[in-house]
Amino acid sequence: MLHKDVLRLLAPIELDGVEQGDREVEGAALDAVQARDLDLLLEMHPDASVELLSSWERVLGLPDPCIGELGTMQERLAAVVAKYVETGGQSRAYFIAVAAALGFTVTISEYRPFQVGVSAVGDPLYGTDWLYAWLVTAPATTITEFAVGISAVGDPLRSWGNELLECAIGKLKPAHTYAVFGYGGITDNLINEVSAWTLIGGCTMAPAGIADPGGHQAYTFTDDSVTAYERADSSFFAYTEGETLYFDAWVKKDTDDTRTIHLLVYGTGGVAVSSFSLRFKTNTGDYATSNSTTATISTPVITDYDGDWWRISFYGTCGNGTTLVNIIFYPARGLVLDSNNAAAVGSATLGMVKLRSSY
């Protein structure tokens, strides 16, 4: 019902003429006010605000003095939403969520000092000061596309920049730590970031209740199918063809002599798949490597730590125009090391797993 009709019903008698014209004018004004009330309901939510965006910025202390005025409507909205939902935290997951709210996909890695008996040959010689540093890795360039309904007239069709990410992390990080930012390439990829790994074909994963010698939480993966190749896949990372990839992992020793495990670095995005891998017996330490014709792999370094863990390290390259790589882990494959075609049943426990493009 329109407001002019409501005003008509309020009159004790039916009025025509000038009074009817007045009701129509006043009713139209009240209709417009009601419509603006609905607009106000939308403006109450910062992620949908347009007219009150500057008020949200004022209340939340934006624009941030460390980066000054933001250029586009999308950047301003992203900054408002991130500040509005901010609750504080010190975990890896918290800072990944902060970055995501700003439109950035990142990974976070921590450094560990070199320790005799724990670190492997070829590990970086980090000192104790590196305990307080952590690495934030984002795409080389984060592109913000013009979006109808979010962007404003005059905003560029595309904009680039990572200043907002560095500013937000820098302001929220614990005061005694130092955040290092890296863009593009491969960074440490830890198995205990459960959200970064996808279970395929019925494979299951559960905390093992122990830590590897480097202090990383260990997880047990299980393949319970005698016919299916059950596995766990990490996230994909950007890759430049021919770049050397360094693989490093802790694998729990056991007495299982009914299966092998398979650790695969998988490259895609090019003309064809390009990959290199290692098949491994967790009870004896025996292994075999394989690689596609366009990939390379080094001789692995296998170290036995205190009879409880294996430290596995190797490196290789992918070809065929590869632009993306990830890690694939099969907890149970056939016993023949130089064949990856046989399915098997079994479990295997991993601690840290890293794939990186440089030491």
Image (cartoon, rainbow, N blue to C red):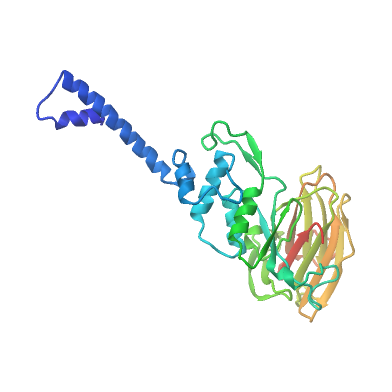
Q: Is residue 286 visible?
A: no
- The C terminus, quarter of image: bottom right
Q: Position of residue 91 (x, y in %)?
A: 60, 65
Quadrant of the rendered image containing residue 307: bottom right
In the rendered view, tell whether residue 206 sits above or below residue 292: below
Residue 4: quadrant of the picture: top left
The answer to whether one can see residue 253 in this image is yes
Question: What percent of the width, then of the height, locates residue 130?
Answer: 73, 68
Considering every residue shown, the one lying at the far left of the view is 13
Residue 148 located left or right of residue 217:
left
Q: Nearer the viewer, residue 341 or 299?
A: 299
Q: Is residue 234 above or below residue 349?
A: above
Q: Number of numbered discs present?
A: 0
Q: Is residue 98 left or right of residue 326?
A: left
Quadrant of the drawing holding the N terminus: top left
* Residue 198 rendering spot, x and y as whole percentages: 65, 57
The quadrant holding residue 347 is bottom right
Residue at (53, 38) in percent of width and height: 150
Q: Residue at x 76, y 70 (%)?
A: 250
Of residue 5 and residue 136, the one placed in the foreground of this image is 136
Residue 223: x and y in percent read 68, 65
| Front residue (pair 326, 348) | 326
Which residue extends farthest bottom?
306
Residue at position x 66%, y 66% in the image: 177
Horizontally, is 39 left or right of 358 in the view?
left
Residue 210 position (above or below residue 359): below
